[in-house]
Amino acid sequence: MSQRISQDAYTPRPEHHFTFGLWTVGNPGRDPFGEPVRPLLSPAHIVRRLAALGAYGVNLHDEDLVPRDATAAERDTVVREFKQVLADTGMKVPMATTNLFSDPAFRDGAFTSNDARVRAYALQKTMKAIDLGVELGATTYVLWVGREGVETNAAKDPRAALGWYRDAINFLCGYVLSQDYDLRFALEAKPNEPRGDIFLPTTGHMLAFIHTLDHPEMVGVNPEVAHERMAGLDFSHAVAQALDAGKLFHLDLNGQQPGRFDQDLRFGSDDPKGAFFLVKLLEDGRWPGMRHFDSHAYRTEDEDGVWSFAHGNMRTYLILKEKVERFNADPEIQRILAELGGRGEAGRVSFSPQQARSLRDRTFDLPAMRRQGYAYERLDQLTMELLLGVR
């Protein structure tokens, strides 16, 4: 492979399926200690600018587009005008979700609040948001409900809370089926923030929970880089488990340093090697879903900085995608991988009485097994050199 590549290969285009949330590039830079530093951007302006940068689409919470207190007529006007902008730019809305965390009513959670009225209101709000998402063309509905958790275990029986959570997902699946919507749910895990401890804190927890639902075939996961990294976990492993289970319905790309607050950094900016192996997993597996960026520009940035940030997310993914192609074509890397793959019998083991008898009688050369190395240091160094641009 040539050591030089046209910069056009790093230019985002709609066929790359890059998407952003209205709340991501629209983030005004507010944080718990400071007021906004940038003016709010209108949804129409966001769509036009992202389209010009080569994005495929935008995703949204209900309140990112329709104000919480809008009348039915105002709602219809906002949606009609937004749909016109989508038509003018060719942008899509592949995913929608609901804001179940900002309103003070949700201070104790939405689907797991101790107050049954709050749980009912959360379902009502979500049904309306599902209607909105479907009207805009969404086929995936992400549920990150934000405040489903506790600060003190004295406040809530976690078994009861999980029961309420299950009831809500079952109800919403029933609603989608009753409306004949082409829509799947993707559950998003997070270990903490804004609650001290959030129920179902990792992707693995969510995958186990899905199998207890009435319609598990309708429900998958939406892993997020930052959320798994906040728990100190390797994100590509969470994605691999979801892929293996056939449950990777959506994906949130960003960056995160372990042990920090939810940073939502530009994709790949914190851990290029981790981002590389994630891109490799997705591209080698030809995963057909959206490459969605749930990240925010630094609070230091003005609006120009926001668009530099948006472009940077997409460009980094494409650079890493090209690095994956180099990795897969590198003779020395592939020789090491072939040697590792060629040790002993290939394939996966499956039980049969004959196989069990054969295995029980097999003789192993333990001294040789104990002596052998695996060349992982060399393999990792070659990977680093490739990523650093000297290979």
Image (cartoon, rainbow, N blue to C red):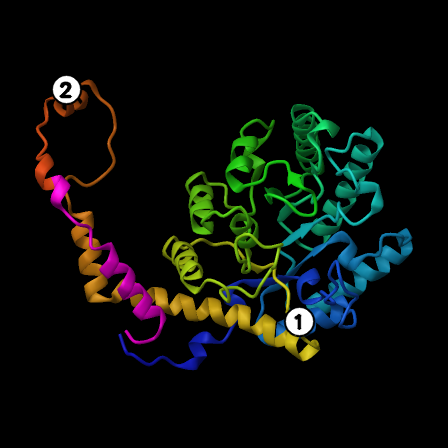
Query: Residue 267 in the image: x percent, y percent?
Result: 53, 64
Residue 357 - label: 2
Residue 30 vertical placement versus 162 (above, below):
below
Identity of the residue drawn at 75% across and 69% down: 44
Residue 376 is one of the magenta-drawn residues: yes
In the image, 255: left or right of 329?
Answer: right
**Residue 107 screen position, x and y as percent:** 79, 41
Q: In the displayed structure, does residue 282 sit left or right of residue 28?
A: left
Could you say where residue 227 lies in the image, as x and y percent from the top left? 57, 49
Crowd class of label 1 (few under 14; some 14 to 19; many from 20; radius 10 Å): some
Q: Main secondary structure of the magenta part?
A: helix
- Image: 337 above or below 209: below
User: Which secondary structure lies at badge 1?
Assistant: helix
Q: Nearer the viewer, residue 383 or 319?
A: 383
Select label 2 or label 1 by which is in front. 2
- The verdict on residue 260 being magenta is no
- Magenta span covers which residues? 369-391
In which quarter of the view is residue 172 placed? top right
**Location of the N terminus (image quadrant):** bottom left
Q: In this rendering, is residue 214 above or below 258? A: above
Indicate the position of residue 265 as horizontal and vertical percent values: 58, 63
Residue at the disc numbered 1: 89
User: Callout 2: 10 Å neighbours few (<14), some, many (20+)?
Assistant: few
The amino acid type found where label 2 is placed reads Arg
